[in-house]
Amino acid sequence: MKAVPIQFPSLPSPDGRDASLEAGDWIIQLGPLVADLSKYAANWWKKMLLATTAKYEHGLGADPLSRLRITAPENAPLSAGFERLDQRVTSLLLQSVPKAIKDEIIAACELTTTQILFRVLRTYQPGGLVEKSRLLEDLTTVPTVKSASEAVSALRLWKRKASRANELAAQLPDPLLLIRTLDGMARPIVDGSSQASFRIATFRMNHSLDICPSLDRQCLALLRFAPG
């Protein structure tokens, strides 16, 4: 075990509109940090995460009553031989979750890695119905942007949400609606630059985006509209 101090990134509050998306990103960020704790930590973490997400995904497809009976996987068999690592990661997880969730974890005595991860998944519900509904709604809702920098940030977030919807195998809205949303977000850039307006108009014409749009063409447009 490394003695070097390591701190996990803070998990955002579950009250935010993009809380499910942020929780998924937060879990992804933990992988390299856990792997740096010891030689075998990466394999241990992968095993813990797979077991916990499998239980969580099973709960997503269960009826409400059955879902209440689904709990976190048994931590002891998974952490056999890695008890100290488990305690280290448990401590780091407790420091990174919001206080309200930490209080619930302590009150329920869920002081193992799998129990904390399962609590986070059930609270934020990444991949659940709420996240899918909000993703599809956000893909067709034009946010208010007042500058080119805000427009670029909005386009990048839109791109992230489109990728996430694809990961969840969600049925994307009609391409015309998606193009209309991108139009609204890119408006501050287009209106402020004749060169940008000309290039975008040329691109749209060459790829028939306004005549017979498809999701494949939409992806091409997205790469041009949302850099990075």
Image (spheres, rainbow, N blue to C red):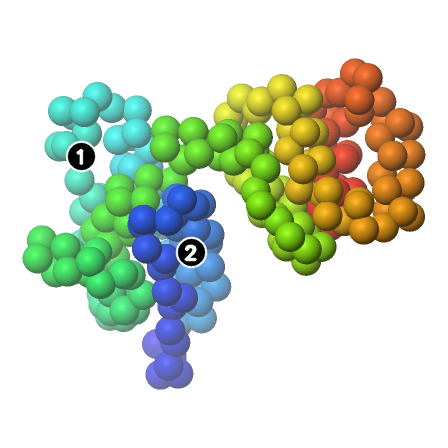
- For numbered disc 1, what is the local secondary structure? loop
- For numbered disc 2, what is the local secondary structure? helix
Closest to the observer, 151 or 203? 151
- Residue at 32% over, 49% down: 15
- Disc sitting over residue 57 in the figure: none
Q: Is residue 204 above or below residue 88?
A: above
For the residue marked with disc 2, what is the amino acid? Trp
Report the residue marked by disc 1.
70
- Residue at 76% over, 49% down: 189
On the rendered image, what quadrant is the N terminus found in? bottom left
Q: Position of residue 135 (x, y in %)?
A: 49, 34
| Residue 214 lies in quadrant | top right
Q: Position of residue 178 (x, y in %)?
A: 65, 28
Total numbered badges shown on the rendered structure: 2
Count residues near mark 1 (Cα–Cα under 10 Å), then give few for <14, some for 14-19, many for 20+. few
For the residue marked with disc 1, what is the amino acid? Ile
- Disc sitting over residue 26 in the figure: 2
